[in-house]
Image (tube, rainbow, N blue to C red):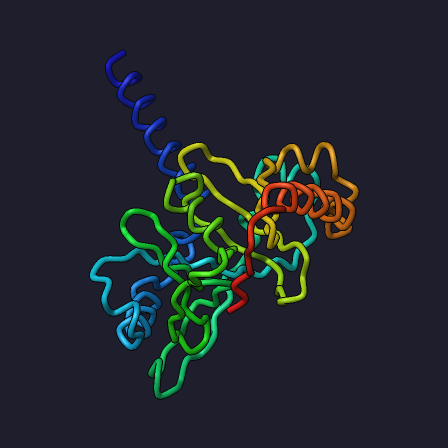
């Protein structure tokens, strides 16, 4: 009887460990965060504003390749995560030195209180401090993403599509390892909206398989209307670099 209980406990522990690894793509793919962070720190050290800050946190938003077709069940049980592969590129420049780097969509930098400080270029690793102005409110859109990571809403965020400055809506995936769930983050200049993967697949499945065009329009209009109502009497500008 004792052996049976011990075996059950061991099986449960292994199961929990496997479940954690299943959602921990950074560990599973052995992404070299140390080399990436080193390059970001070098860029920070060369920035006159950043170098005054002794402590900071670095949040990479990784890019994964998604080339295989998925069924509805693949998304609902999150097995689609098993088919994604990280993208890499060769770094060879005066600034970064030589070596393989994991490709990132964005690299965000915050202080130890969670205040958004700025971002690092994903290729040169030059760091750019957040936009500030005494006359108008500067909207640093990336702060919405760094807030999600600092406050542990998600353990990491990744993208599976190339995005461009003229995109109205960008879709990111947010993973919470402890809760073992995945959400879609609809990112716009006017804010973000988070939807559980299950809700998107069950209620907008057909649209999702067509790059979620209709849902993106709906969310964009919703966030813009809310933003315009809130900011109608406030002078503001967007930070675009």
Residue located 52% across and 61% down the image? 63
Front-lying residue, 238 or 235: 235
For the N terminus, give its image quadrant.
top left
Front-lying residue, 74 or 139: 139
Q: Is residue 164 left or right of residue 100?
A: right
Residue 3 in percent (x, y) is at: 26, 18
Q: Is residue 27 left or right of residue 139?
A: left
Residue 197 in percent (x, y) is at: 61, 38
Q: How many marks?
A: 0
Q: Farthest residue in the bottom direction?
A: 94
Q: Is residue 204 left or right of residue 185?
A: right
Front-lying residue, 233 or 165: 233
Front-lying residue, 148 or 179: 148
Above or below, 42 relative to 158: below
Residue located 40% across and 54% down the image? 26
Residue 60 in percent (x, y) is at: 42, 59
Residue 116 in percent (x, y) is at: 38, 54
Q: Farthest residue in the top direction?
A: 1
Above or below, 115 relative to 86: above
Residue located 54% across and 59% down the image? 64
- Residue 119 figure quarter: bottom left
Q: Is residue 77 left or right of residue 12?
A: right
Above or below, 115 relative to 123: above
Above or below, 88 relative to 14: below
Q: Farthest residue in the left direction?
A: 54
């Amino acid at each position: 009887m004792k052996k049976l209980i011990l075996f059950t406990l061991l099986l449960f522990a292994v199961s929990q460990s496997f479940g954690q690894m299943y959602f921990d793509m950074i560990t599973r793919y052995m992404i070299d965060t140390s080399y990436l962070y080193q390059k970001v720190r070098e860029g920070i050290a060369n920035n006159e504003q950043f170098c005054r800050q002794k402590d900071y946190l670095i949040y990479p938003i990784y890019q994964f390749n998604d080339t295989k077709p998925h069924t509805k069940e693949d998304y609902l049980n999150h097995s689609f995560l098993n088919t994604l592969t990280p993208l890499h590129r060769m770094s060879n420049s005066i600034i970064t030195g030589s070596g393989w780097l994991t490709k990132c969509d964005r690299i965000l930098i915050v202080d130890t209180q969670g205040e958004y400080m700025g971002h690092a270029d994903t290729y040169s690793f030059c760091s750019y401090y957040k936009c500030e102005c005494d006359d108008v409110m500067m909207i640093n859109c990336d702060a919405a993403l760094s807030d999600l990571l600092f406050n542990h809403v998600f353990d990491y965020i990744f993208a599976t599509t190339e995005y461009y400055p003229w995109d109205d809506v960008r879709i990111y995936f947010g993973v919470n390892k402890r809760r073992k769930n995945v959400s879609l983050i609809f990112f716009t200049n006017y804010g973000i909206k988070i939807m559980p993967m299950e809700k998107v697949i069950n209620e907008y499945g057909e649209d999702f398989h067509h790059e979620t065009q209709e849902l993106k329009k709906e969310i964009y209009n919703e966030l813009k209307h809310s933003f315009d109502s809130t900011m109608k009497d406030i002078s503001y500008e967007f930070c675009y670099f």
